[in-house]
Amino acid sequence: MSARRGIFVFLVLLVALGGVVLFAAIVLRGSTTTVRPSTVLVYRVPTELEESGLAFESRRLGFLAPERPTVWDVVDTIDRAAEDDHVASLVLHIDDLDWGWAKVAEVRDALQRFQANGKDVYASVSGGGEREYLLASVADVVSTEPLAVLQLDGLTASALFLRGTFDKLGVTPNFASVGQYKSGVEGYTRTGMSPPARQALESLLDAHYEVLVDSLASARGFDPDSVGMLLDEGPFDADEALAYGLVDTLLYPADLDSLAARDGEHRHPTLAFNRYPERAPSGGPRIALIEASGTIAEGRSRESPTEGRILGEETILKALRDAASRKSVKAVVVRIDSPGGSAQASDQIWHEVRRCKRAKPTVVSMSDLAASGGYYVAVAADTILAQPATITGSIGVFGGKLNVMGLYHKLGLNVETVTRGRHAGMFSPFRDFTLDEQKHFQAQMEATYRTFVSRVAEGRSLDAATVDSIAQGRVWSGLDALDLHLVDRLGGLEDALTVAKGMAKIGPDQEVVVDVYPKTERTFLQRFVADLIGEDEETDTSLRFPPAIQACLAVARFPSGVTLALMPFTVDIH
């Protein structure tokens, strides 16, 4: 046999072998999705849980990365398992959670619906603090490891200020804002919180603390005062947690699986939560679920280590138009998880939500954040729902630039500029605003703020003066937002779908198909390869930086002169 023919035969055999392996992998993986009677689902709860999936143009290793479950994926799976006679119980293994409080409440609500169908929930907490324990607390049996520590010691909220660093570097901030509480500029212009910013943040922290205490008291059978005293006594080692009734038993995670699966001398079969079969297609009425997650900006949606998640207005406009134009779609639910961003892009999305509302009943469900531009988008809908801990409002705007000439001089650099036109260099990073330019820019901010207030007044059927009094850039909890008529009711995704069904005149007991938008853009090969390596639900190839590094990167790409409807600070309550 010639060398050329030998190579050809080898390649043919290699391709054939690859086809056999591919076919075998598909068959073997498909066989794992059979749900046998009395199955126990075992869920290794992921550290991260996003509102939207792979429609984002990820700059990660997107080809190889497994599809990360979204909030809807998790909630829908729990709800389907609750109705499945083959599923007996659910075990949660919880470690560190980087979820917002509304996402925790969303999944917690689904677990309670699972229990309402007469099924048990078991939870193992290996570590973490309030968020982790809040999710676990709803379980019928809460366990921790013998050497674990529960970091239950109350809540904190922090804000990072860069002005001291700017002064050392020779960078001069030039900013304008509208709203007494619109403290987004304070991270650049101050070394600490202003009194209004501190007041707003403390009020938000109080609301979250109240929700936490009430939820834990209800779940564990304590009175709220006792929960408050326990939080003052924490953190707790495993023996203390057991003695105080915070956990029911001390078991290693594998032993908790055995406890859940044990039935006398018999064992129930177990199945990994992410292997539970997807919902079978049906021909019922359809509701569009549009996932709007990330910082609002022009262009297409994307994700990167330096920018985080970006909600591109092009992507979301297309999703809204597709949903509105499909005759099979009877209603639209827009799920918002956004701190805001570009005021112009927010206004474009607001306009498209308004158009969508004219075609189909449109409901907004707010997740962890619907602040500033995120709330701007929401007010165009027919009805708005929020979780008690949803950060809501921040009706205000800011913008500006950073003058880096002082830094250049420290580095031995110099820049000389020639211009034609009095304001030609207004947004130059090499000089400060003139007094006239500062007034001009402030006027632009105030005009945008008035438009923002008018959008809210129109959408919420309030007069502009009332909106202005509760706006001023202040963030509110979902509980406060309900009292202020910024939202219509409290609830999560399931409640939003129920409202949408009612508005679309779909019977309350009639099953609907939920179509998720924007549509995932992955080839079959991408999906298959990702699925093959997707055994570990914790898999995440994204690169993350510490908060201080993220803040510096944000400064480096700050959009000079752009009006931002963006939440003040990065509020992380933990």
Image (spheres, grey):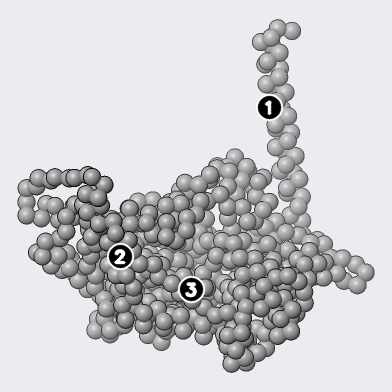
Pointers 2 and 3 in contact (C-beta within 8 Å): no
Label 3 packing within 10 angstroms: few (<14), some (14-19), many (20+): some
Q: Earlier in the sequence, mark 2 or mark 3?
A: 2
In the picture of the structure, the residue carrying the numbered disc 3 is: 573
For the view shown, which residue lies furthest in the left direction? 421
Q: Earlier in the sequence, mark 3 or mark 1?
A: 1
Q: Secondary structure at mark 3?
A: strand
Residue 185 position, x and y percent, is: 29, 68
Residue at x 70%, y 25% (from the top left corner):
14
Residue at (81%, 67%) from the top-left corner?
Answer: 255
Determine the CA span between mark 3 and mark 1.
Answer: 53 Å
Tell me the kind of residue under disc 2. Answer: Arg
Could one spot residue 116 in this view of the protein?
no
Q: Where does label 2 land, which residue?
A: 163
Does dot 1 land on a helix, a strand or a loop? helix
Residue at the image point whose x is 37% and y is 85% from the top? 484
Residue 209 placement, left or right of 133: left
Judge depth for marks 2 and 1 and give the one in front: 2
Question: Type of residue at label 3?
Answer: Ile
Q: Which residue is mark 1?
A: 15
Can residue 472 be seen in this snapshot? yes
So how many labels did they put on this image?
A: 3
Q: CA distance from mark 2 to mark 3?
A: 23 Å
In the image, farthest residue toward the top: 2
Question: Disc 2 to disc 1, how far (Cα)?
Answer: 61 Å
Q: Position of residue 217 (x, y in %)?
A: 62, 87
Is residue 8 positioned above or below 435 on the image? above
Q: Residue 273, position in %: x, y? A: 69, 61
What residue is at 53 percent from the left and 45 percent from the top?
62
> Picture coordinates of residue 403 (x, y %)?
22, 56
* Marks 2 and 1, the one that precedes in the sequence: 1
